[in-house]
Image (cartoon, grey):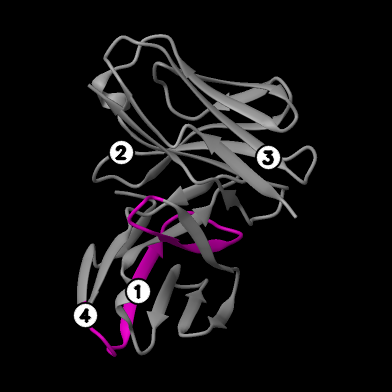
Amino acid sequence: KNEVEQSPQNLTAQEGEFITINCSYSVGISALHWLQQHPGGGIVSLFMLSSGKKKHGRLIATINIQEKHSSLHITASHPRDSAVYICAARGSQGNLIFGKGTKLSVKP
Amino acid sequence: SQTIHQWPATLVQPVGSPLSLECTVEGTSNPNLYWYRQAAGRGLQLLFYSVGIGQISSEVPQNLSASRPQDRQFILSSKKLLLSDSGFYLCAWGRGVPEQYFGPGTRLTVT
């Protein structure tokens, strides 16, 4: 079993839909990251969470430390949101332990 | 501001050939440096990390090696590439806080 599990693996949505991507982890963490990987491979850090909730534009990330669960929400989704979204937990060495990613495709 | 560079952006190499990927960071000193690999259909995997010049820790046994000849330079190498070495290689830096910053990546295809 992976230390960081994401669901779903693939997600197709219509433009305007509300999207939720889930992440569960089994390790103790000091921070959890949500990353966005574009088709060319480049990665952008969206959020770093240690508790509660963060919002940036149409993106919202939440974390429940007790349940070891985090969610990434996208409101009013748009085709430009199509990307792979990766959840990553910070390990003891400062490295990140990655989930396998959720491939999101938003259709116009 | 800090910037991280990786090159080359793409590389096609035959099996058995050597490899050298370079990563440099600007605008910061004494960063922690990381090499990650993303194989097809798999998540990112930490390969090496370094907390200082000449200090390399390996997370996964493999035919790759890493070196840090200068404070802001991190090199990933192989003497003989395998087909299984194909993937997307990302360099990242951090400063002891959870945030990590990723380079643009190198897509390696071993033929």
Q: Residue B111 versus residue B31: which sits nearer the camera?
A: B111
Q: Which residue is mark 1?
A: A80
Instruction: Determine the residue positioned at 45% across, 67% down.
Output: A68
Magenta span covers which residues?
Answer: A13-41
User: Looking at the rendered structure, which numbered label has been put on residue A13?
Assistant: 4
Residue neighbourhood size for the residue with mark 4, other residues' Cα within 10 Å, grouped as few (<14), some (14–19), many (≥20): some
Nearer the camera: disc 1 or disc 4: 1
Residue A87, given in percent of the width and then of the height, sits at 42, 61
Give the Cα distance between marks 2 and 1.
25 Å
Going by the numbered disc 4, the residue's amino acid type is: Ala
Check if residue A65 falls in the magenta segment. no
Q: How many marks?
A: 4
Element type at mark 4: strand
Q: Looking at the figure, which quarter contains the N terminus of chain B?
A: bottom right
Q: Which residue is mark 2?
A: B39
Q: Chain of mark 3?
A: B
Q: Chain of mark 1?
A: A
Q: Chain of mark 4?
A: A
Residue B90, given in percent of the width and then of the height, sits at 48, 40
Give the Cα distance between marks 3 and 1.
29 Å
- Badge 1 vs badge 4, beta-carbon distance below 8 Å: no
Question: Are marks 4 and 2 in one subunit?
Answer: no
Q: Looking at the figure, which quarter contains the C terminus of chain B?
A: top left
